[in-house]
Amino acid sequence: MYARFLNRRCGAVRRLATLLLAVLLAGCESPVRLMPTPVSFSSGDIDPFAVAGDKLLGTDVPVLYATNRGAVVEKPVPLYTALPSERLRMGVAHVRIGDGTLDWDTLHRLSTSDDEAERPIVQLEMLEPLVSLGKHERVADSPDAQAFFALVDRALAASASQDLLVYVHGSNNTVPISAAQAAQLRHFTGRRMVVLAFMWPSAGSILKYFTDVGNAAASVEPFTRLIEMLAAHTKAANIDVLAYSAGAQIASPGLARLAVPRPGESSAQVRARLRLAQIYFAAPDIDTRRFVDDLAAYVKVVDRVSVAANLNDSALRFANLVHRGSRAGRPNPTELDAQQTGFLLEASQRLGFDLIKVDPNEIPKLPLRAHDFWYEDPWVSSDLLGLMLLNAEPQRRGLALQSTDGGVKYWVFPPDFDRRVQQLFVPAAGAPR
């Protein structure tokens, strides 16, 4: 637990933070509940927490955060707005699973079985702001920034995996929700991966979707700056990115910007400098043509790019209509020109691009129009964890290969995926990646 490396604020500050959050959130949003146990761990035969160590276990799941939200109040209890800022504010989000009465044994049982008991709430208790860095401020000139990145390194050193996972949430989101989802990621990696939530300024309302679209565009530069700083100032072996829904509107163009070489720099040198490994887009809400063009710019400087798509996704059906063009998570291939189609063919066959078809007709109990499948469906979440924890290619993760009439490869969940993915984790249980 990151708490080992932090100077905890006094109890009064924690109580004030909790009270303020309760006031702000009362009646405003549904609570985040612990997601269903990934099928890879639901039999109880595989314990993802076996190598975490006692100090990393418990119902507290702190995660790192960075945000380009504006701030009305910075400290001691930050109050962030839904307006974009050029400043990057970073710190630790203290998240707890349960209401304070939940013990580790119960949480462990719920996290390693398919117990259908009501899932406990995952809630943000407080934000601990550590640094506020202006657009043109250098880390070398900021003791607070240096201390934050030193904290990242200590958290990595205490984790079984030396990879850092950056989570970019979707639209209709809030700080507490994004912190809770990031904490779920860390929890179900068996506390083996360090997770950082990039909390861009979503307005937190489906009625303000186009506000979110504008704020996402304003968040691309801060996202690229964050990735560059993490690569330059931490010892992360690799940096992985999970972008959900409208988070793709930040991560996709951001990765394309990051791939632009500095003067005299080759693509191989860009790749070595950034250390970007697994890039995973869950139900990406971004124009299909823009996504393909971005992918062409950065695919050679990362290890692997995965897109998980449900062609019946109701949220993206709405986005298709309002944008008058298909979204990458619900693509219409006829919108692509010959060059884009040819690139996708090459990318799927030789460049480490994996299109994963999330088909409700093939996955048990997956709702037909699901958009949140990456964490709500035990099969899809297991596939994601197989990628992030084990660096496993699709076939090794238990997916089955298919191809379109044009030869573009894609992957599907076979009927025995649950058995296959459990076998994947057997040799890795108790061993870090």
Image (cartoon, helix red, strand yellow):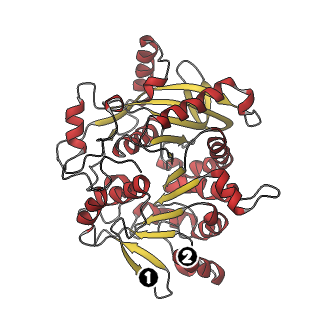
Image vertical order of residue 20 relative to residue 114, above or below: above
In the image, residue 138 sits, relative to residue 193, either above or below, namely above
Q: Which residue is mark 1?
A: 403
Quarter where residue 295 is shown: bottom right
What type is the residue that disc 1 sits on?
Answer: Ser
Give coordinates of residue 112: x percent, y percent: 23, 46
Q: Position of residue 14 (x, y in %)?
A: 43, 17
The span from disc 2 to disc 1 (Cα, nearest Å) is: 14 Å
Task: Name the residue at 34% across, 38% down.
Answer: 52
**For residue 414, which quarter of the picture?**
bottom left
Q: In this image, 264 relative to 20: left or right?
A: right
Q: Amino acid at mark 2?
A: Arg
Number of numbered tags placed on the structure image: 2
On the image, which quarter does residue 350 sit in? bottom right
Horizontal arrangement in the rendering, residue 223 relative to residue 98 (left or right): right
Residue that lies at the very extreme toward the bottom in this rendered image: 405
Choose between 359 and 173: the one closer to the eye.
359
The residue wearing badge 2 is 350
Name the mark nearer the viewer: 2 or 1: 2
